[in-house]
Amino acid sequence: DTAVSQTPKYLVTQMGNDKSIKCEQNLGHDTMYWYKQDSKKFLKIMFSYNNKELIINETVPNRFSPKSPDKAHLNLHINSLELGDSAVYFCASSQLLGNEQFFGPGTRLTVL
Amino acid sequence: AQSVTQPDIHITVSEGASLELRCNYSYGATPYLFWYVQSPGQGLQLLLKYFSGDTLVQGIKGFEAEFKRSQSSFNLRKPSVHWSDAAEYFCAVGAGYGNKLVFGAGTILRVKS
């Protein structure tokens, strides 16, 4: 069974479009995250949610809007896509106090 | 602010040789430290973690790491590298409220036969 899953795995789209990436975890964790890995493989936190509430927003543009319908899901919606949004986006989950994060397989977003 | 430095961008070792990947961190409190591995086109897999206690921690795939507070280091080691260990390795520190991970820039390991 996949612990943290993301869909789609690949996403190719035009500038200006709106797209969503979905994430689900079946680990029973309370906290979920989105990370962005740029072309140089640098990983940086974007958002963190605990029990459906936003607890970290690392100065991400307003075009990015995470949505957590329940604590097992954290989706990422991106409006008005720009070339610089091209990256691999990773979802992760953990127990808040446990700190050990489990990562999904990633979604490679390419904006043309 | 928290930060993690991995001084080596690339390391090449021969199969069967020993390996040490360096990691230095900057964090005001007692750190939670992690090593993750990423194979090409894959997600991140946790190799090992340090929260407290014994400063030498064992992980999966024969890896170990030693926490040295005086040197602010958490170096990853393996006594004998296998070709399948070729991947990119990331050191990370768990940084306080919100539980975010701050990652180093990664070290690419190449294994030559």
Image (cartoon, coloured by chain):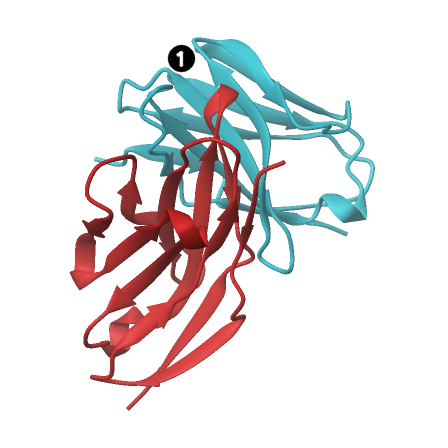
Chain colours: A cyan, B red
- Which quarter of the rendered picture does the C terminus of chain B lie within? bottom left
Local crowd at mark 1 within 10 Å, few (<14), some, or many (≥20)? many
Please give the count of numbered marks on the rendered protein: 1
Q: Can residue B43 be seen in this view?
A: no
Tell me residue A34's x, y (percent): 54, 32
Tell me residue A101's x, y (percent): 37, 34
Q: Is residue B31 visible?
A: yes
Image quarter for residue B64?
bottom left
Outermost residue, front direction? Answer: B70
Image quarter for residue B60?
bottom left
Tell me residue B94's x, y (percent): 44, 34
Image height check: is B51 above or below B66?
above
Image quarter for residue B75?
bottom left
Image height check: is A41 above or below A80?
below
Residue marked by disc 1 = A71
Residue at image point 19% right, 73% down: B79
User: Quick one: SS at disc 1?
Assistant: loop
Tell me residue A104's x, y (percent): 40, 39
Residue at image point 54% right, 66% down: B7
Specify the amino acid type for callout 1. Answer: Lys
Image height check: is B104 above or below A96?
below
User: Dot 1 falls on which chain?
Assistant: A
Is residue A101 toward the left or the right of residue B99 in the image?
left
Is residue A27 toward the left or the right of residue A31 in the image?
left
